[in-house]
Image: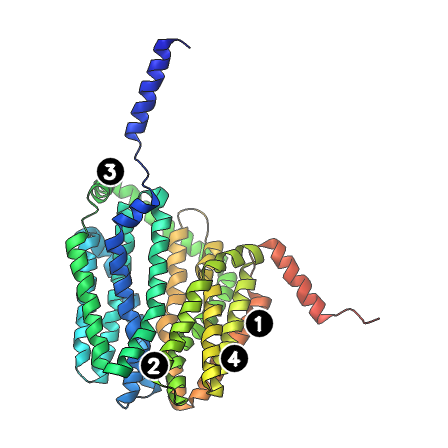
């Protein structure tokens, strides 16, 4: 190779390096997103602080299990209804101002709690669910806009870990504050967290200027150039999603039955800890510590869920999760400190092992191509509706029958769900499907003893 050719190659290489965006190090990502991560932790901590303390406060104010269940349902409703409006709002005002709006809802939710009325607490829980939904969407969008695609998965995983950490710390902190200083101290700490998140967002979060502006400009040009084509594409997407639902309706129905059982035991865990702890005459601080134990185990085990699903199959993960949570909820009927603590550990272990299971099953069933997103949206709509239906039904059952009956019914639903998983839910991993079939045949027709 001649000297001139070598020099031209060096020039071209230098130009390519200049044009290619530099990938930030992990430390640079953490440093740049530290304000966003702090708002994420503070916002989730506001949820964790009242997860146990407010249901106990409702009982202290003369409320019953039905009102506690309605409280949890209103949080789920607020979380669900905010998704679509927040999605339309984000492109208009940007991620930063959407997060500021969520912080305002957090502050409003905490402020009205100082009025001693169950109906006000219900309105506060609805606002809390709405604020959490909007805030999480804004934080995810902001991180996606400022972080290089090579580091985006790492950045979002840190956000998820901080959210789980806040939910693990919040119940214990809230019940401790309630027991030592009263319920107003919990709401005051909520206000401090919300105010701090608001100030951090105002002072340290900049607009994702270059990335957001570039993407917005490209999106605008694409919209202007291909408006008719996009309309036809949306029609094609909905047609593909509809065809996929009709074609795989049987498999989808079987998976949704699993989702109903799983959501039932998950929501039952959150509902029964305050009610069962109060029925067992445990202190509010101890009840909060049990809830914190459950969420801590959940946080520590959740990284193993993906390995369990990929190595042993989806049905194995669903069966193990439902059995553990069903057993944990059933232990609550014994009404001792040891049984309630064991229930917290088992339900946390079971819930952690099912982390991401429902979305993985939905992704397995989703059709290839453009209709995948629409199919997953319909799928999420069905199983997310259990977020607010289940607590209300369990609260009504507890008021109509008894807390023991509600706990046993939830445990039975989890047990039936586990059996349903083995017998009816399709497995996408063929090796595990053959192995599970062999196990079932062995149990049904055991070999004779010699």
Label 4 sits on a secondary structure element that is helix
* Relative side of 398 to 353, left or right: left
Q: Which mark is residue 225?
A: 3
For residue 393, what is the image quadrant?
Answer: bottom left
Q: Residue furthest right?
A: 450
Q: Which mark is residue 96?
A: none
Residue 285, numbered circle: 2
Q: CA distance from mark 4 to mark 3?
A: 56 Å
Of labels 1 and 3, the one closer to you: 1
Report x, y in % for residue 332.
47, 83
Q: Nearer the viewer, residue 88 or 180?
A: 180
Which residue is denoted by mark 4 in the rendering?
A: 412
The residue depicted at 26 percent of the width and 58 percent of the height is: 38
Q: CA distance from mark 2 to mark 4?
A: 29 Å
Label 2: how many Cα within 10 Å (few below 14, some 14–19, many 20+): many
Q: CA distance from mark 4 to mark 1?
A: 11 Å
Residue at (39, 71) in percent of width and height: 386
User: Residue 385: x and y, percent?
Assistant: 37, 69
User: Whole-percent x and y of residue 41?
Assistant: 28, 62
> Looking at this view, is 79 or 135 the one in front?
135
Coordinates of residue 444 in the picture (x, y in percent): 70, 71
Q: Earlier in the sequence, mark 4 or mark 1?
A: 4
From the image, which quarter does the C terminus lie in? bottom right
State which mark lies toward you, 1 or 2. Answer: 2
Residue 71 can be seen, yes or no = no
User: Residue furthest toward the front?
Assistant: 180
Q: Between disc 3 and disc 2, whose residue precedes?
A: 3
Q: Nearer the viewer, mark 4 or mark 3?
A: 4
User: Are the residues flagged by discs 2 and 4 in contact, CB closer than 8 Å?
Assistant: no
């Amino acid at each position: 190779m001649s000297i001139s050719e070598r020099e031209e190659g060096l020039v071209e290489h230098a130009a390519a390096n200049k044009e290619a965006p530099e990938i930030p190090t992990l430390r640079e990502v953490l440093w740049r997103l530290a304000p966003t991560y702090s708002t994420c932790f503070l916002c989730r901590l506001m949820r964790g602080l009242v997860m146990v303390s407010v249901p106990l406060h409702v009982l202290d104010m003369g409320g019953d299990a039905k009102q506690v269940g309605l409280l949890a349902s209103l949080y789920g409703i607020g979380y669900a209804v905010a998704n679509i409006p927040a999605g339309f709002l984000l492109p208009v005002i940007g991620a930063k101002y959407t997060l500021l709006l969520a912080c305002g809802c957090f502050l409003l939710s905490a402020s009205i709690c100082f009025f001693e009325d169950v109906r006000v607490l219900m309105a506060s829980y609805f606002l809390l669910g709405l604020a959490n939904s909007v805030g999480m969407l804004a934080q995810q969008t902001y991180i996606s806009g400022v972080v290089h695609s090579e580091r985006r998965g790492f950045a979002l995983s840190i956000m998820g870990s901080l959210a789980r950490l806040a939910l693990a710390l919040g119940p214990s902190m809230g019940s401790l504050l309630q027991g030592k200083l009263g319920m107003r101290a919990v709401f005051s700490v909520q206000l401090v967290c919300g105010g701090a998140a608001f100030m951090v967002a105002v002072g340290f979060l900049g607009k994702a200027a270059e990335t957001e502006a570039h993407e917005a400009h490209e999106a605008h040009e694409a919209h202007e150039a291909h408006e008719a084509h996009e309309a036809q594409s949306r029609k094609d997407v909905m047609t593909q999603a509809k065809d996929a639902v009709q074609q795989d309706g049987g498999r989808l129905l079987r998976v949704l039955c699993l989702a109903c059982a799983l959501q039932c035991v998950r929501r039952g865990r959150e509902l029964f800890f305050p009610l069962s702890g109060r029925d067992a005459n445990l202190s509010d601080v101890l009840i909060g510590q049990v809830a914190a134990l459950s969420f801590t185990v959940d946080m520590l085990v959740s990284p193993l869920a993906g390995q369990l699903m990929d190595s042993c199959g989806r049905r194995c993960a669903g069966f193990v999760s439902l059995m553990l949570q069903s057993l944990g909820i059933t232990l609550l009927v014994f009404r001792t400190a040891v049984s309630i603590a064991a229930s917290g550990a088992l339900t946390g272990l079971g819930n952690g092992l099912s982390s991401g299971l429902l979305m993985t099953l939905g992704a397995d069933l989703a059709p290839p191509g453009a209709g995948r997103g629409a199919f997953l949206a319909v799928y999420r709509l069905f199983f997310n509706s259990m977020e607010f239906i289940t607590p209300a039904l369990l609260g009504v059952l507890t008021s109509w029958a008894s807390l023991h009956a509600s706990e046993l019914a939830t445990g039975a639903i989890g047990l039936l769900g586990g059996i349903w998983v083995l017998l009816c839910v399709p497995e996408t991993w063929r090796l595990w499907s053959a192995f599970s079939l062999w196990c079932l045949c062995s149990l049904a027709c055991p070999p004779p003893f010699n």
